[in-house]
Amino acid sequence: MSHKIEILTTPSCENCKIVEKMLNELKMSYEIIDVTEKPEYLERYPIFTAPGIVIDSKLEFTGIPKKQELLKKLS
């Protein structure tokens, strides 16, 4: 089963790159959304820390999740 994964990011977000690498290692596809370019995402998902990880239109994590927790949400 495939999930729709979106990473809510900001231009200078180092943690976002860690999450991208994690998803790449899990061979998951995802979309990167820069909230400075698409502020409507902040209205829908009010995150205070980047990255925000949205799975199937639900904000599941802010910041860097533990790999096991991320896997659990995706399995």
Image (cartoon, grey):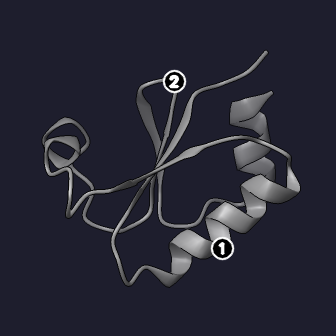
The disc placed on residue 43 is none
Q: Residue at x 73, y 32 (%)?
A: 74
The part of the image, by quadrant, that contains residue 48 is bottom left
Tell me which residue sits at (76%, 62%) in the image: 22
What is the crowding at mark 2: few (fewer than 14 residues within 10 Å), some, or many (at least 20)?
few
Q: Is residue 47 left or right of residue 4?
A: left
Q: Is residue 1 above or below residue 14?
A: above
Residue drawn at (14%, 51%) of the image: 39
Badges 2 and 1: C-beta atoms under 8 Å apart?
no
Q: Residue at x 51, y 24 (%)?
A: 56
Viewed as shown, does residue 22 lie left or right of 7?
right
Report which quarter residue 41 is drawn in. top left
Camera-nearest residue between 37 and 54 = 37
Tell me where residue 15 appears, x and y as whole percent: 54, 77
The disc label shown at residue 18, or none: 1
Location of residue 55 in the rendering, given as x and y in whole percent from the top left corner: 54, 32
Residue type at mark 1?
Ile
Rendered location of residue 17, percent (x, y): 60, 74
Q: Kindly identify which residue carries mark 2.
A: 56
As helix, strand or loop, the secondary structure at mark 1 comes to helix
Q: Residue furthest front?
A: 37
Q: Could you say whether the residue bearing mark 2 is in a helix, strand or loop?
A: loop
Hey, which residue is sitting farthest top in the picture? 1
* Picture layout, residue 70 above or below residue 18: above
